[in-house]
Amino acid sequence: MEDVRIILAGLWVALMLTYLLGDVMRIFAGDFTPGEIDGREASSWMWVLAAAVMVIPIAMLVLSLVLDYPAIRWAAIGASAFLVLFNLVGLPYPGLYDNLLIGAGFVINGLIIYYAWTWT
């Protein structure tokens, strides 16, 4: 049982780093305009929403280690499924690297769902 918790925690870290790598690469590739999201000037609520989405893997990392079973099982499945749907809405991205990293994120989310689903 502790093995699954550690695996889930590691997968959440991997997912978070994949998202952050995409953000950093987007900056260096010049595929962003400061202060804009999706070509529009971003309001404060948009930044709050972006922060809330990005904090999900961080919160799930902590919850994977402290939340009781089976609550963490369903929380992991729900959070991971939400992130998959959230990222599907944004496809395709202009950069090939971004689409590759989103694909890697889908694989990691799939592993999270698999490990949480098969956890007994």
Image (cartoon, rainbow, N blue to C red):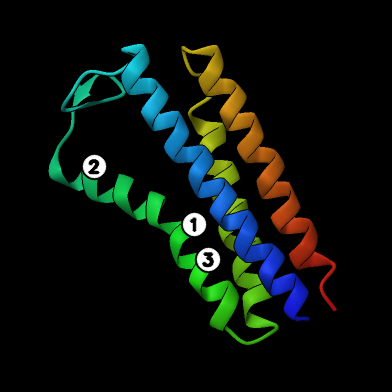
Residue at horizontal 55 percent and vertical 83 percent from the top: 66
Residue at horizontal 49 percent and vertical 57 percent from the top: 57
Res 46 label: 2
Q: Is residue 32 left or right of residue 35?
A: right
- Disc nearer the start of the sequence (3/2): 2
Neighbours of disc 2 within 10 Å: few (<14), some (14-19), many (20+) = few
Q: Which image quarter: residue 3?
A: bottom right
Q: CA distance from mark 2 to mark 1?
A: 19 Å
Residue at horizontal 49 percent and vertical 48 percent from the top: 16
Proximity of marks 3 and 1: CB atoms separated by less than 8 Å = yes
Q: Residue furthest bottom?
A: 68
Q: Position of residue 106 (x, y in %)?
A: 66, 39
Q: Is residue 107 above or below residue 92?
A: below
Q: Indicate the quadrant containing the C terminus: top left, top right, bottom left or bottom right.
A: bottom right
Neighbours of disc 3 within 10 Å: few (<14), some (14-19), many (20+) = many
Q: Which residue is mark 3?
A: 61
Name the residue type under label 2.
Answer: Met
Numbered disc 2: secondary structure: helix
Name the residue type under label 3.
Answer: Leu
Proximity of marks 3 and 2: CB atoms separated by less than 8 Å = no
Q: Which residue is mark 1?
A: 57
Q: Is residue 29 left or right of residue 1?
A: left
